[in-house]
Amino acid sequence: MLGFIRRKIGAGGSSLLISGQSLQWTCPAVSALRSYSSGAKEMTVRDALNSALDEEMSADPKVFLMGEEVGEYQGAYKISKGLLEKYGPDRVLDTPITEAGFTGIGVGAAYYGLRPVVEFMTFNFSMQAIDHIINSAAKSNYMSAGQINVPIVFRGPNGAAAGVGAQHSQCYAAWYASVPGLKVLTPYSSEDARGLLKAAIRDPDPVVFLENELLYGESFPVSDEARDSSFCLPIGKAKIEREGKDVTITAFSKMVGYSLKAAEILATEGISAEVINLRSIRPLDRSTINASVRKTNRLVTVEEGFPQHGVGAEICTSVVEESFGYLDAPVERIAGADVPMPYAANLERLAVPQVEDIVRAAKRACYRSVALAAAA
């Protein structure tokens, strides 16, 4: 299998394995804190991911893409549009419908020094390959005493979409974030998508890259800095999307947008909410979260996943351990319902956090909620 990959990647040019050297990049930490410039042009998340893949494949011949329908069909969500034509079938590999098989091939290629990007059509299907992700990729560096690096990216849509049922709607952020040896990234905006995917591909360790299907077509401002081919974002650094002084709201992926909408509503009622885009679930930027809570004295965590053992639970623990004395109200935790995702549209909406849920939680934390008796 590895010989096949080696011939594929090395075909048509000088062998990329002769020197054993990989390109090096730096990710300036300042990028995580910089806001969109006023003259920034817009880009969809889909185009941001596509351009990041294109630039990294162009910069390093060891980078290749594999997965179901990534080549001829140009990706189930058109993330790999144009890449097969540009780089050929030697570096954009269509695979059979066998996640365990092609994920194992990808991990083996990473052992050999290549940099595979493995696409899952949905992260629900990564369950077929979880043995390779956890036991083969995540643990190898530790078990080899640092002698084996596994520079591989597992990417694809994660979490709820719309009307696709329980087996295609689960959020795996908390699952993978619980595993030592993995890094877990969750982009929200186009700048996140470009900068974090580039960082993931350049990283020497396995990265789980959780996208959101409903965000692919969303457009966001992208600064000139973020459009530069050298741009990347530091792994493990959150971004304060909106500053505030009354309550901290943490969120990731699609829930960042919901939290920003909630903050706008809260502002009309005199509540100043600080919204933190986590960007990275593992490692988690505990210092930014705790610094914000020490300023606002209140915390609301937001996520799409199940409530038990979730990302919000880990954030709550961190704040209790490091900033408990600063809290002026109980922590509020907003998550998906503790049930498999319903198929019926009305029940599906009830199972996923909505903007109004975040607003109510923030008002409770600020002791501004309306009593039920008064509302009757």
Image (cartoon, helix red, strand yellow):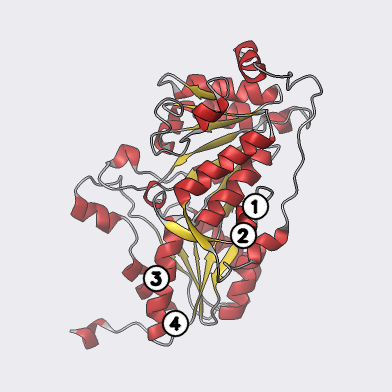
Say if mark 4 contacts mark 2, CB within 8 Å. no
Report how far apart the C-alphas of labels 2 and 3 lie in the structure.
26 Å
Q: Is residue 263 above or below residue 83?
A: below
User: Which residue has dot 1 on it?
Assistant: 228
Disc 3 secondary structure class: helix
User: Which residue has dot 2 on it?
Assistant: 224
Number of callouts in the render? 4
User: Which residue has dot 4 on it?
Assistant: 366
Say if mark 1 contacts mark 2, CB within 8 Å. yes
Report how far apart the C-alphas of labels 1 and 3 lie in the structure.
29 Å
Quick one: label 1, few (<14), some, or many (20+) residues within 10 Å? few
Disc 2 secondary structure class: helix
Quadrant occupied by the C terminus = bottom left
Query: Disc 2 or 3, which lies upstream in sequence?
Result: 2
Instruction: Give coordinates of residue 112: x percent, y percent.
Output: 70, 21
Disc 4 secondary structure class: loop
Query: Disc 4 or 2, which lies upstream in sequence?
Result: 2
